[in-house]
Image (spheres, helix red, strand yellow):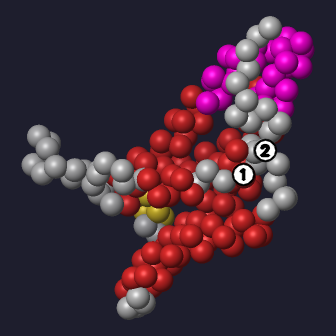
Amino acid sequence: MLVYHQPGATHEVPAFGLAGQTTLTLLRVRGGRLLHVVLNRTPWGLHVRACGEDPGAAEAAGIDALRTRFTAVVIGGAIASLGGVYLALAELDLYSDGMTAGPGHRARCRHLRSLDTAGSNGAALFFGFFSALQFSLQRAGVPSELMQALPYLAAVIALAGFAGRVRAPASDGVPYVRS
């Protein structure tokens, strides 16, 4: 409020001049590719995947499973927070408590939990498409009830199309305690 003279107001992140693409959008594309390379082509990525499948076996191989899992969770949280930063700074130009509650819950799909970066990028584009479609339909005069149901319809389509094809790591959600 002190800087922008009204609560919740922020400046838009400047564009690179690439047909309206913002800095954060470009970082998202580059970051997705970088994350894919790191998780699939580096020893640390192999350690993360091993700790997700069987932390006990990873410990037996000399990997500190607790440290690796903690580091991966912190990095994942930092990456996820960029979505909120984008929404507040580049998309809406304001911040409001709870503004990411809906998209944040929809983003927690099996692709994101399975370390499948190509699938998670596809899921992000899929839900992004339906989000953009919702705004386009609003301008076209489609009833608000249909627009409110659109995210749930997208989730049903995603579940019908990907159910059974993606497997989360075996130790997903299971706390690991050294014995």
Q: In this rendering, is residue 64 above or below 9?
A: above
User: Which label number is shown at residue 168?
Assistant: 2
Q: Position of residue 51 (x, y in %)?
A: 79, 26
Q: Secondary structure at mark 2?
A: loop
Disc 1 crowd, CA 10 A, few/some/many (<14, 14-19, 20+): many
Q: Is residue 10 above or below residue 176?
A: below
Q: Residue at x 82, y 48 (%)?
A: 167
Q: Is residue 169 above or below residue 130?
A: above
Q: For this rendering, which residue is in front, 173 or 130?
A: 173
The image quadrant of residue 166 is bottom right
Give residue 110's mark: 1
Residue 80 picture location, percent across and down: 53, 43
Q: Amino acid at mark 2?
A: Ala
Q: Is residue 49 visible?
A: no
Does the residue at mark 1 contact the one at mark 2 (Cβ under 8 Å)?
A: yes
Secondary structure at badge 1 equals helix
Q: Which residues are magenta?
A: 46-73
Q: Is residue 138 left or right of residue 123?
A: left
Name the N-terminal-most of marks 1 and 2.
1
| Residue 172 visible here | yes
